[in-house]
Image: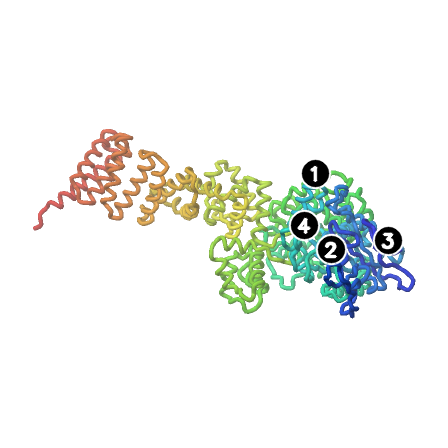
Amino acid sequence: MTCTKETVKASGLNIWSDEAAGRPAPRVDIIAVQGLGSHEFYTWVKKGSLKANKPKRLRDKARFWKGKRAAVRDQEDNIEVMWIRDLLVPGFQDARIATYSYKSDWRDRTIKTNLRECANLFLNELLQHRQKENERQRPIVLIGHSLGCVVIQKALVIAASSRHFREIGLSVAGIIFLGGPFQGSDAALWGTWLAQVLRSERSLLELLQKDSQPLFDIGRDFAECLIDWDVIYFYETQNATYGPLTFQTVNQQSATQLGKRMIPLDTDHSGLNKFSGEDDVNFKRVLPEIRRMVEGGGLIVTERYRAIGERSPKSTVPISRDNKFVDRQDVFKALDIQFSHSDCHNRAVLTGLGGVGKSQIAIEHSYRLRERDPNLWVFWVYASTAERFENAYKSIAATLDLPGADDPKTDVLDLVSRWLSNPDHGRWHMILDNADDIRVFQKTQGEGSATGDGPNLPLLDYIPQSTNGSVLVTTRDRGVASWLASGYRDAIPVNLMTVEEADQLLCARIPEGLSTEFHRAELVEELDYLPLAISQAAAYISAKVVRMTVSKYLRLYRQNEESQSRLLDEDTGDLRRHPSVPNSVIRTWQISFDQLKRNKPQAAELLSLMAMLDRQGIPEFLLNVQYPSLLDLEDALGSLHEFSLITIEKGGKTFGMHRLVQLATRKWVEKYGDNKRWWGEAIKVVSKAFPDGSYSNWKTCETLSPHALQVLAYRLESRKSMLDRASLLHNMAWYNWIQGRYEVANAESQESLAIREQYLQYDDGTILASRSMLASVLSSQGKYADAEALNRQTLAIREEVLGKTHPSTLTTMSNLADVLSSQGKYAGAEVLNRQTLAIREEVLGKTHPSTLTTMSNLADVLSTRASTRTPRR
């Protein structure tokens, strides 16, 4: 019996047209699902006329008691148009048309509901109304508004892996989404706050908040369903008013999905599901899509059931083949060798940096395998978490139509594993993508698995090693190879692209005429030949094609580090990557960094320190300053190398980082507010490691100079960091002075002295050392008067504090004597040298090197003085 305005239910399926006299038997079901807190009838109602351009009658007129005249609206022009009933029912004579309502008014304290409950009720209602033989595989067209779109997504995710509801999922011919908040809505935040004040149910409001993780998970699961539904996304273009606030309830980005058709409607959010009549502009945009799905639905659903009935081996790889794929010949050659033995179980592990192209290689590899052997099953398993691994196995069970797969008590992991282990089921190849955390596979079901009543086994045990199967793993962590394969011999490194490969990738991703060979070569070099970075840059250039070229992108990129991080953090859409995987280089690598921070905190700290140094030529002895335990250092370095975050140079004693890894690490450190901490640690480490400028230290000084210059660029204000800076500057000045770089040494010694004078007592030994250093530099520059003044100040303080016989005092006396001699003040120089000599002979002895040096200096002064007195002949 069909529903009326008076009999419509607040919860459940309301049928507005069904088999009746004069109507053909239904061949399609059209079902509309309401949004959050909506009225079961009025949510689909708009005031208007069913027919546009309808002739109007003369308006009745009446004189009011005050004598004013006013028009009384024509009741027919003010009709309630419930478009599901009034437009779709007469327009689709051979369809059963219904609406689905559920109690979700968050203002009502008595209502307690959640998304899963709404989705399950929806599926059960559909199932109960599709019991007849001619109904069970009848095509379905779904229409959702707002939260109703998410209810549909959740219901179809459940149906895809459920034996009871699987026919419903297979029968869906098309889906119309009207303003689905798939990435949340700002309005939900205000609603949550109000619900909290009213002490009413707010679980659905919390679900709909901006960037909600549960929403993200539902969208991911919906995208991973192995049924290719025809989906159209409609979105609003007008703002809505909420009291004093005006904003777009669900913006375009939230209401649509990359790669799917999207159509704007000229209305706000509440108007997306209301149409005034046949000539309503928005209805004219929606109606053709409904009609197309209705007319083509029978063929789509029939073909879908036919394909399932054949049960021939197929691939569950969720991403189509890339017709512009850049061949990585060395990797594919290694894969062919690894999987060349068909009489045994084979495994291979693709390892490398995030964004280096491991997943893309695995996708292409899967298509090549199927080309060679169409009878090969290929199963794609997202393996980043235990939950995703198990969901993938549930999808495999649904694809294989394994009995009992949708029973909550069934151990689906064991069910799939047993099927894979049976040679009678044919050959199979499994791809474990993003298996970056080995702990996921070491966990048992009792430690966070969602599977039913099975034995507590680690996930590792559910990947059979049967001879009819093979496994390819992609991972950032090379150490995974020792757990998921036969060790490092099964690991195939995926390195950065060659120059030719990188250029080919860039050319394939940007429109013609936007680059020259020279500028392309410059750009791919700047991007370290990393595929993800190149694809990201190409997407940016292509999106702004009117005003952007490769050369202009290069100029923007080279402005400064901030520009680089902004461009590399641009999360552009990429159909070739899974929706849950970031498309930006910065965010991709930060996943690895976060994993290190959780699992290997010491390695994460070492990475943070190394990122603050110069990226090349980082010596092991410099890192020993921070990590005196060789075992701790080796463990941390090993973890970083396993993740390909560092490179090893010069026999394992020197390390480096790719420039983009360094940039991404710095942005990650900044994200956690730790940048000043690691600036300070870097200055401390380099300051401790940088020796004085003595000849024996020259090689060390040369090695550390790039790192010293890097850490001196950081501006810190703490007393400790500033004194570390002064110490480093002092030793650098010493080295540069000895090397003859007097201007540089002057600036460094000046700054070192200024810092120490600011933070230390006037008679501190390091201040006196800085003065002596500066005096030596000034003397070498021929600025003898300034050098003499500094030496006299230093000598006076050292005599007062240390005494006249202290070695430092004697050194200053000797330095002052040299400056006096350089100015021709030989008498003063002679006196100081004799005093120094007398003390050193007494304290050190006549044969001590310092005594002999002073004797030599005195002899030089006497000789020079004598020569200046000799008259010319």
Q: Amino acid at mark 2?
A: His
Report the disc number at residue 849: none
Q: Which residue is mark 3?
A: 129
Q: Nearer the viewer, residue 56 or 616?
A: 56
Sequence-earlier tag: 1 or 4: 4
Q: Which residue is mark 4?
A: 216
Which residue is the extreme one toward the front? 66
Sequence-earlier tag: 2 or 1: 2
| Mark nearer the viewer, 2 or 1 | 2
Residue drawn at the location 22% of the way across and 34% of the way down: 836
Provide the secondary structure element on which disc 4 rests. helix
C-alpha distance separating marks 1 and 4: 23 Å
Binning the other alpha carbons within 10 Å of mark 1 as few (below 14), some (14 to 19) or many (20 upward) gives few
Q: Amino acid at mark 1?
A: Glu
Residue drawn at the location 76% of the way across and 39% of the way down: 455
Q: Which residue is mark 1?
A: 447
Report the disc number at residue 145: 2
Residue 578 visible, this orientation: no
Binning the other alpha carbons within 10 Å of mark 4 as few (below 14), some (14 to 19) or many (20 upward) gives some
Binning the other alpha carbons within 10 Å of mark 3 as few (below 14), some (14 to 19) or many (20 upward) gives few
| Mark nearer the viewer, 1 or 3 | 3
| Mark nearer the viewer, 2 or 3 | 2
Q: Amino acid at mark 4?
A: Phe
Q: Residue 853, image x and y in percent? A: 24, 38
Q: Residue 802, image x and y in percent? A: 28, 30
| Mark nearer the viewer, 1 or 4 | 4
Q: Residue 325, image x and y in percent? A: 62, 62
Residue drawn at the location 57% of the way across and 68% of the way down: 512
C-alpha distance separating marks 4 and 3: 31 Å
| Mark nearer the viewer, 2 or 4 | 2
